[in-house]
Image (tube, rainbow, N blue to C red):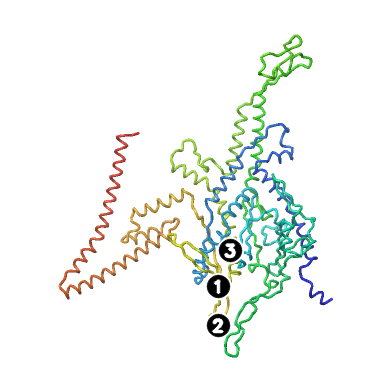
Amino acid sequence: MEEMEILRPKIGREEVRKAADILKKYKQGKANLEKRIIDNEQFWKMRHWEQMAKNGEGGNGGDPQPTSGWLVNCILSKHADAMDCYPEPTVLPREAGDREEAAKLSRILPVVLKKNQFKRVYSDAWWYKLKSGCAVYGVFWDGSKLGGLGDIAVKRMELLHLFWEPGVKDIQDSPHFFSTELVSNEQLLQQYPQLEGKLRAGSFSVSRYLYDDTVDTSDKSLVVDWYYKKGGVLHYCKFVGETVLYATENDTAVPTKTAVIGVDEKGLPVMGQVPAGRSMAERGWYDHGLYPFVFDVLFPEEGTPCGYGYVDLCKSPQKQIDLMNQAILKNTLAAATPRFFIRSDGAVNENEYADWTKPFVHTNGNLGADSIAPIHATGLDSVYVAILNNKIAEMKETAGNRDTVNGGTVSGVTAATAIAALQEAGGKLSRNMIDDGYEAFSDVVKLCIELIRQFYEMPRQFRLLGEMGREEFVSYDNMGLLPKTMDDGINVSYRVPEFDLEISAQDENPYKTMEYNQLALQLFQLGFFREDMADQALRCLELMDFKNKDRMVSVIAQGKTQAKVIAQLQSQLMQVAQVVDEAKGTQLASALAAEFSAAPVMNSKRADIQNKMSAMDQMRQKTRQVVNPQ
């Protein structure tokens, strides 16, 4: 019995059964969330009449079912705002000794994200977030990348396939976390031959969207990634049905590395395998000890890590708009389509009467005045159209999707600067929404740094773009991120390098770019880049705040330093020239003095000429306006 207990793995069939029971409980807890997500997807596809019909709100089956795109247009506008402000991380050190490592990470992390096509992942996450209120990023270590060397993988996760303890606000507080996926049996058998004869339909199934295509899942099995925390260590188990495919607690093998273990008789080193760290059972799945998932919430809700999105916010106005459109269309069709009352004992040929192409209609008797009577439809009052327009305006105001935000103009506003000011003021809701998304992106980047710290033991090669677009090829590993020894002469301790993140938009919108360019031109015209005005320019910049201010201060200070160096070299050259003149009787010093004094005069003359030319151009434009107002 003792031998059997020793051989039995810690995670076996019984533990998997308990985990499956917990998974079922978690699924029951998020049933309402899954129903809402599926319903929101139907609204996004403009198939909401089907959902309304289920609730008895669709009217008669033969009624027109118009679908207006006001809600879809709102989501399109918000997604465009988000992609205009695609984030870029800047790593800041917490210790002075980590500045070099922070600068390296600031340049390497965007490359790591680009390898994962993160811009596409970011776009997909924003679509999901705007529709359902929450997007989830998964940050994993993929050992199959780079030919087995491994690298970071960042994915957008499907919220219907994730499960956590109901009622928690932060998923890190959940004792268990499950990520599920339907995988074809053929693929599973190729990767895990031990599943032969064990793949069968289970009692657990994941929720699915209402697809337009027929999706057959009969030949697929549910693969469960089970994450749980024990003693502050994150553990991981992958199982199908009751079969364990991998579990960290079962992995007791200690990793090894090649190192010098001694010397032979000739004094030459002898290489061998030595322990390289703790086993997975002791270390856990990831050293950071966190579930590798980041929830990006749009509008937060209490008691859940998810939130609600613009479909939930504008679903009711969209229904009312379409129902009113339906009523107006029905009235229009009723008024535009001729209809008649016909007596049942009348002798009128109804088919001929209904056919407007036939000039004659036959009757079998006398045609009375009451045999046929037209049906008059009552026209709608203009107040109903006004109510419809008010509902559309309500949706725009509720979603913050006013006309000015999308490039429209307000009556009486024609100046470009006024329109830009209205757009800037109207975009404050989008800016607030995007800033909240930056916090989730910051968590994604932090997980990437932790994976680099744990797994980048072998150096990776990166191609970076330096200043002015110059290419640089650098090698990077995790040596600068490992614990560092701190010895003050009394105590010896270790410090783990930690960093702060500053997230900014990688590409500003065209209006911001134009504003920054105009500011740079104005500063140039005011002489901020002249060496003799460097002190005044630096004092003025201390009171200003704009993008790339630090770079401009560095350029002006560098120009000031260069001017000092040039002045020193000129002084030294004058001293040498005077010595040469005394020795050989030449006039080299006076010639150099005249040349040095002429340089600033020429610069000032050039500036005067440029100012006069610009003034002349302005006078020409004013003269043309007076002579030819058209």
Dot 2: few (<14), some (14–19), or many (≥20) neighbours within 10 Å? Answer: few
Q: CA distance from mark 1 to mark 2?
A: 26 Å
The dot on residue 479 is: 1
Say whether residue 142 is left or right of residue 569: right
Which circle's residue, 1 or 3, is located before the other in the chain?
A: 3
Amino acid under disc 3? Lys
Q: Nearer the viewer, mark 1 or mark 3?
A: 1
Query: In front: 305, or 68?
Result: 68
Indicate the amino acid at tag 1.
Met
Q: CA distance from mark 2 to mark 3?
A: 33 Å
Which residue lies at the image location 30% right of the left edge and 47% below the top edge?
614
Q: Residue at x 62, y 84 (%)?
A: 261
Q: Amino acid at mark 2?
A: Ile
Q: Earlier in the sequence, mark 2 or mark 3?
A: 3
Q: Mark 1 vs mark 2: which is more N-terminal?
A: 1
The residue that label 3 is drawn on is 446
Q: Which residue is mark 2?
A: 490
Q: Quadrant of residue 543?
A: bottom left
- How many residues crowd around disc 3 within 10 Å: few (fewer than 14), some, or many (20 or more)? some
